[in-house]
Image (spheres, rainbow, N blue to C red):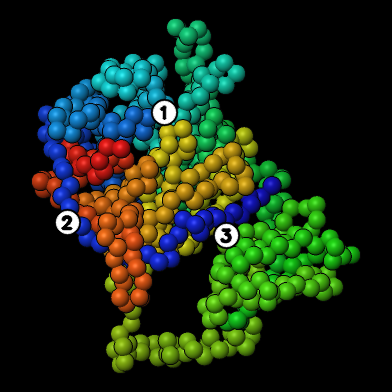
Amino acid sequence: MAASNYSLKVDRHLLDPNFESYRLSLDPLPMYNVELETAVAEVGLQESQYTLDHVRAFGMYNYLHCDPWYEDSMYFVDQHGRVMGFSVTLDSVLGKPKEVFRLSSELHGFENRLCSSIHFTSSTWVTVSDGTGRLYLLRTSKRGASPHGKWEVLFDQTLGEPFIILNSLSYVASGCHSFEVLVLRLEKEEVLSKGSGFLVSLEWLTITGEGDKGEKKYAILTRRILHGKSVPHYAALEPEGNGVMIASDRPFKFIQVNGEPIGETSEEAMDVEERKEPIYYWQQTTEDLTITVRLPEGTTKESIHFKLSMDNLQVGLQGFAPLMDGQLYSLVDCEASTWIIKEKSLEITLVKKNEGPMWPEVVMGDRNGEFIMDPAQAALIMEGLKYLTSEDLNANPEKDKPPCNAQELEECDVFPEDSSSLTRFDGRTLKATHVVNLSSHQYLFTVVTNPEEMPCLCLRHDVDALLWQPHADKQDNLWEHIATFNALGYVQASKRDKKFSTCAPNHSYAALCECLRRVFIYRQPSPVSTELYNRKEGRRVGQVAKQQVASLECSDAVLGFNATNERLFVLTSKNLFVIKVNSDN
């Protein structure tokens, strides 16, 4: 079966159409500085790691790891290969980070070493990579009760080329304790004639334990490999390894399981053949759209399933899967829109709510239709573009206005690649089951709001930033809109020196951190003690969204950045800063 196109369903109750702007607040932010005894183990890119993917994956790596199971507990690796733990109990009395685990002392001599990575698998287990290709499974006991207790190695194995850990989880099924781990590599591919010469490789490992509880031994059961052409923005495993979700500019595909290549099945080849013939054709004017859907011979009016709302369309035959289903690109006038059966087709007329703008697609993310441009409309467009062309080989571009310089475009003008998508792969069949087109939604950041759930991803929608929580067990609501950060999509694009972005697990604020010194905090709107009056619009304002700026007392580059409900943590090579954002609940 081919993957179904899926649309992200925005919860309009979480949008604020009356949001104006953030107001700069000069309220002081308590900041505490912890000096590190040994510098952070920062690993710079080598000459052979020259691509943009290397920079995205390793050059912009977050060296500060937040333990989502125990609030305000942070970890990092220092230059001696020690995993250092830091926990806050009282802001005014901060202790020093303490060693919980030590990696091999021979790491510095490794030629293609990457940064060490840590992922908190559960409340009592951690996965660690030393940056040389070695993976550790560590039992930690309950870290909240003893945040500085020593970690015990129960599995360690070299997996090949160096990698970083993206995601991991632990579960017990049928009495068997298992781990799922997802790692990222960039591999040199000599046969590639185009591009950078590197392949992005994701490896999904299943590790299981056998034997009695006291003497259980862990071993790799399954190794699955996916290949793609771009570093994923987001990659996370579903609970119990039922699937994996990946957001990336280029598609990924499973190519190997336990060393055996995966061939294209005849069913998959048939799907490709079937997809060549569009399910529907559509045309549009500035006022409306006309959609023609192919129907089987003998189809009656009673067998048609048609459901239309202002922003959603569902079309199909009774008893069969929908032919069109999802969120419309823009709003339509339901009362003025119609449908009629003509011979072997269903003709639908959708009247645009907002006349003028042309739609790039009917249903967002749906690639099953084909757009047919009206000849008269095409002629008008060609006439309008004539001034951009010339019969001369080198026309004078400075005669009226100089041409647009793409280098002068700001980041807020840039949209993701057309092929940018969020894809869900089934863990059993290794086939894509759901695909969301992200070409108009810029990826912003990933954050864990609940350690029992998959990580959330934050995407730009128009000027806002919307937070999406994946739900693997809800096929009708795989990605739930749980929070909105007003205008953050536009605000973050204006920060040219931005390095990290995140938000509090309870969504009370979002934060951006520049490469050096400055941290920007954007709070959710909150009631004001004295009601304000907007003279321009003639209305009262009962709440205000505040922006705050914190400046670090240090000129070293920022290496790590994380947020909890009460505090922001900023890591440099020799210091760990703690910024108190919210007071105790």
Q: Relative to the observer, which residue lies in front, 191 or 180?
A: 180
**Where residue 31 sits: x, y (%)?**
15, 42
Q: Secondary structure at mark 1?
A: loop
Residue 384 badge = none
Is tag 3's residue or tag 1's residue first in the polypeptide sequence?
A: 1
Tell me the crowding category of disc 3: few under 14, some 14 to 19, or many 20 or more residues within 10 angstroms, Cα based.
Answer: many
Q: Which residue is mark 3?
A: 365
**Where residue 72 sits: x, y (%)?**
28, 33
Q: Which kind of residue does numbered mark 1 sit on?
A: Thr
Tell me the crowding category of disc 2: few under 14, some 14 to 19, or many 20 or more residues within 10 angstroms, Cα based.
Answer: few
| Vertical side of 61 occupied by 407: above or below | below
**Where residue 509 sits: x, y (%)?**
32, 49
Mark-to-mark CA distance, 3 and 1: 33 Å
| Vertical side of 473 occupied by 105: above or below | above
Looking at the image, which residue is at 73% across and 74% down? 338
Q: Which kind of residue does numbered mark 2 sit on?
A: Leu
